[in-house]
Image (cartoon, rainbow, N blue to C red):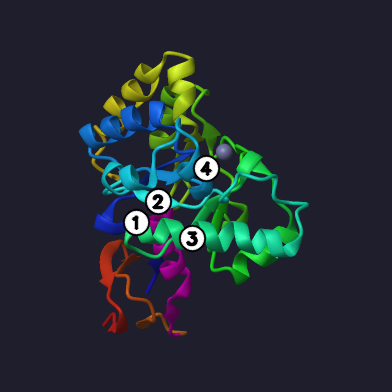
Amino acid sequence: MEILFSYYPGRKRRAITFSYDDARKNGDVQLVEMFNRYNVKGTFHLGSERMKTQEDKVSLEEAKELYKGHEISCHGAHHYFMENVPFGTMVNEIMSDRSTLEKTAGYTVRGMSYPFGSYSDRLIGVLKKCGIEYSRTTEGTMKFGIPEDFMKWHPTCHHRFDLEELLEQFVTRKYLDMPLFYIWGHSWEFVRDNNFDKMENFLKKATQYDDIWFATNIEIYDYITAVRSLKISVDNTMIYNPTCTTVTVEVDGEPIDVKPGNNKLI
Ligand SMILES: [Zn+2]
């Protein structure tokens, strides 16, 4: 019996995720509207203290409604360069951001992107203790892999690259299980460069493929974590799924849904 790990939820073969930083009102409003129109999801890394004090940011009051159906995620409360600040400040920056954003979002906030792309192993140690489970860097790989370490989640690319060319590679790529196309940026860059049509053209093409799962960062993280948590018997006939996420695997060429708990394959 052969078991392959090649499906995302809904028996989709590929996934695309978006990650946008800084909560700038003139940009996020237009981008969210576009994502909604194409029925895709985004992750928005916000930074709660700046939302309280800076007028160009989406306010905490506005955020709940604006980002509904998308993921609200941390970006450090004050947007500090995080790698060299004292431990106590790291803790405050993250815990206050989580706490404020959770009240706004109405769910647990467990993700982050690094302000200025700045990170270190010292910071990552603190983040994990503060309940952060993934954090995105700014180091584009131009590849479609899933990270070994979600605390160093390197995206595929910033949106300034040729997204349509990369999409072509993404949908034709063979010999890669569960390819993931991860696009990041700042929505204010679309305003500055007057090129929202770049994202619109990408979405028009990408949403025509029905084997692509459009998911938030935390949905990708939770699904991959569930895949990696499966306990499979030595003879490949039983799978114990200790998570609350149904995982689809490929058994002798057929998709099989592995539900939470014990699953017998024959
Ligand atoms: Zn930022």
- In the image, is residue 90 above or below residue 226? above
Point out the stretch of residues depicted in magenta: 214-233
**Between marks 3 and 1, how big is the CA–CA gap?**
10 Å
Give the side of residue 33 with respect to residue 90, left or right: left
Badge number at residue 105: 1
From the image, tell me which residue sits under label 2.
Answer: 72
Which of the two discs, 3 and 1, labels the residue nearer the N terminus?
3
From the image, tell me which residue sits under label 4.
Answer: 50
State the image coordinates of residue 157 (x, y, percent, origin top left). Answer: 54, 34
Whether residues under marks 1 and 4 lie with C-beta atoms below 8 angstroms apart, the answer is no
Q: In which quarter of the image is the C terminus?
A: bottom left
Give the side of residue 154 with respect to residue 249, left or right: right
From the image, tell me which residue sits under label 3.
Answer: 98
Whether residues under marks 1 and 2 lie with C-beta atoms below 8 angstroms apart, the answer is yes
Cβ of mark 4 under 8 Å from ligand 1: the answer is no
Q: Which residue is drawn at 26% across and 45% down?
A: 65
Give the side of residue 105 with respect to residue 98, left or right: left
What is the secondary structure assignment of the residue under circle 1? helix
What is the secondary structure assignment of the residue under circle 2? strand
* Dominant secondary structure (helix, strand or loop) of the stretch shown in magenta: helix
